[in-house]
Amino acid sequence: MKINTSAALRAGLVQLVAVGVLALISRLLLPQLAFESFGWLIGPLAWMVAATITALAVQLPLPPAWLGAVLAGIPSAVATVVGAHWLGALLAIICFALWCGGLAARKIKS
């Protein structure tokens, strides 16, 4: 599979910033109890919002980008369960960036 490295790098950077900004906003606006009770919902929602921002910024089609975000989120979910939440998030960003690079390569080809 070919990867557009420029698109992958841009996607990784945008996703990293978007996730960081959304995490910061969430932390400032929501009480700790919200994360303890609804973190299973808040995290994935923020991840998908960030993926939408990334797809739009890199000019990728949304449905395949959302699929990549869901698939990239699986290792993050596993890492969260074993207590390595932010390491999992970083791994997910890398996986999603590679997915986006692959999408961009196919977009140019077709």
Image (cartoon, helix red, strand yellow):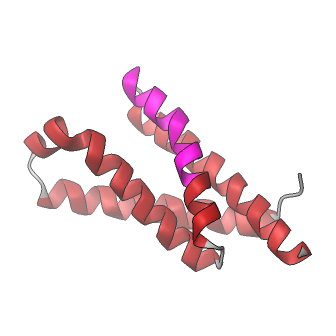
Where residue 97 appears, as percent x and y from the top left, is 65, 56
Q: Is residue 83 visible?
A: no
Question: Residue 108's image quarter?
Answer: bottom right
- Write the residue at 55% across / 53% down: 69
Where residue 43 appears, as percent x and y from the top left, is 33, 48
Instruction: Name the side, left or right, on which 15 lies relative to 65.
Output: left
Q: Is residue 92 visible?
A: yes
Q: Is most of the magenta stretch helix, strand or loop?
A: helix
Residue 82 against residue 62 in the figure, above or below:
above
Residue 67 against residue 10 in the figure, above or below:
above
Question: Residue 82's image quarter?
Answer: top left
Farthest residue toward the front? 63
**Which residues make up the magenta segment?**
69-83
User: Camera-side residue: 69 or 19?
Assistant: 69
Residue 62 against residue 26 in the figure, above or below:
below
Where residue 59 appears, as percent x and y from the top left, is 65, 79
- Write the residue at 49% across / 69% down: 52
Number of numbered labels in the structure image: 0
User: Camera-side residue: 51 or 12?
Assistant: 51
Instruction: Name the side, left or right, on which 68 lies relative to 107.
Output: left
Farthest residue toward the top? 82
Residue 39 against residue 29 in the figure, above or below:
above
User: Camera-side residue: 40 or 9?
Assistant: 40
Instruction: Name the side, left or right, on which 104 lies relative to 26.
Output: right
- Write the residue at 58% across / 44% down: 71
Where residue 7 appears, as percent x and y from the top left, is 73, 69
Question: Is residue 26 rendered magenta in the image?
Answer: no
- Write the residue at 44% across / 63% down: 50
Instruction: Name the side, left or right, on which 34 lies relative to 107.
Output: left
Quadrant containing the C terminus is bottom right
